[in-house]
Image: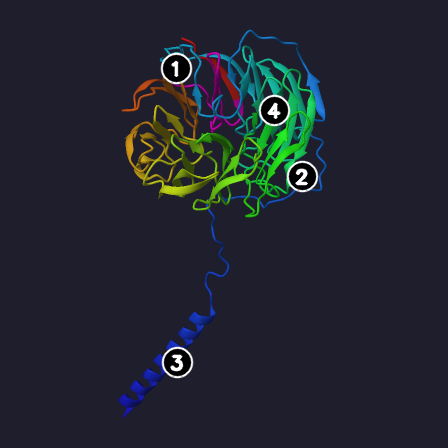
Amino acid sequence: MQGKSTGKFLLIFLALTGITVFVLWFVYNPVKNLKISVPGQDHRPPHTSDSNTVVHIGENYTFLKEFTSPLTGKWPHFRGGDYDNINKEKIKLIDNFGKQGPKIIWKTDMGEGHAAAAIFNGKVYVLDYNEAKKADVLKCLSLETGEALWRRSYGVHIKRNHGISRTIPAVTDKYIVSIGPRGHVMCMSTEKGDLLWGIDLEKDYATEIPFWNTGQCPLIENGIAVIAPGGSSLMAGIDCATGKAVWKTPNPDKWKMSHSSVMPMTFKGKKMYVYSAIGGVCGVSAEGKDAGSLLWKCNDFEPNVVAPSPLILNDGKVLITAGYGVGSILLQLIANGEGFNVKVLQKYLPTEGIASEQQTPVFYKGFIFAILPKDAGGLRDQFVCCNPSDCKKILWSSGNNARFGLGPYIVADGKFFILNDDGTLTIAEANTSKFVVLSQTKIMDGQDAWGPIAIADGRLIMRDSKQMLCIDIRK
């Protein structure tokens, strides 16, 4: 009798326990206080607008020295003269650093960041940030000596976030255009730095400045500065002479500014500007009566962070890649009357094909070269090669003992110049069949040597997070 009562009591107890657990499970949410971790937003400070702060763009000017140079080489904007990171000067360059290493011509301290140089006729132009004075500073230096020639600046308060500055000015024989970390666009005369105009993208275009500050580099074509602000206009063409917009591209999808830069492209006789925004990829007419009109768009690739710029390939193909596990997408443009259709040829993860987190890949002799991101599995940080007919097939890699982090790379005189995060510079054959190291040396002792390389007249400019230097690599 006692045994039956105990069993009955046990059954009732188990039933009540089960009901209680079920109710608690149904009502209680154990993850209600957790937040979704969005790739790229780790440790991001909250977005704050400076819309109520007046920034007098270009207000300060200091002239230091008269200067003329016999040099005529040009690396006039991001990725060089043809936007492909390939130097085409007929200058023989070293293929071995020798026992003493390369000849360092000059060094200069920089504000913490990754802003890099443009070179034009013996002068170097770089937009730096002075933390002590809290100011963006456009510096003009001598390529031959590193001497400061003039500078133009303006006060703006910017918090450090993995560095501060990270753009490259665009330079022509008449104009210099820069974009500061908080979206302040400044246009000056090339010779003496006379201020022509300034635009605040946050105020004038309702731009949401990307976390880690602005990474987009401007371009100038036919006296028109091309900028992709997002906000009220997806893209805009600004007359460098007047500062007035000659065309604006509507932004009905509310795409936002990315760290990526606008790249020119010509397909089927139509010139366009290709941009990878936060929201999708698009092509905008670059000429004619329809300049500024949207020719095509694709929202099949919309990562939260985009740093590499579109890589323009042959036959209307465009490769877009991004970091934080997103991977890449290969697009094919197809002419359709006066417009274009877009076909997705390949879309894959970084473990499945060629990809990049920060630097834009190089298209050279019909092949694509890139440093794979840290989430590419066993090939992470390796320099690799693929044929654009199949971006998922890696033809060769630099190997386990040759990894390069987030550093930049260019092609010059038939060689790759590849910079590691720690300031180690590698010269390798620009070979489409295998990776062959010619020479390697550590030039800088700093860290985060991510700023793009510039080269002209046999002088190579590189930087780490706090110092820029120029080396003579003429043979």
Instruction: Name the mark nearer the viewer: 2 or 4.
Output: 4
Which of the two discs, 3 and 4, labels the residue nearer the N terminus?
3
Q: Position of residue 231 (x, y in %)?
A: 60, 43
Which of the two discs, 3 and 2, labels the residue nearer the N terminus?
3
Q: How far, Cα to Cα, is label 1 from label 3?
A: 80 Å
Residue 144 visible in the picture: yes
Q: Amino acid at mark 2?
A: Asp
- CB atoms at circles 3 and 4 under 8 Å apart? no
Left or right of residue 97, residue 288 in this image: right
- Graded by Cα atoms within 10 Å as few (under 14), some (14 to 19) or many (20 or more), the crowding at tag 3 reads few
- Pointer 3 residue: 16
Q: Position of residue 139 (x, y in %)?
A: 61, 21
Q: Is residue 273 magenta?
A: no
Residue 204 badge:
2
- Pointer 1 residue: 413
Under circle 4, the secondary element is loop
Which of the two discs, 2 and 4, labels the residue nearer the N terminus?
2
Residue 223 badge:
4
- CB atoms at circles 2 and 4 under 8 Å apart? no
Seen at 43% across and 12% down, the residue is 102
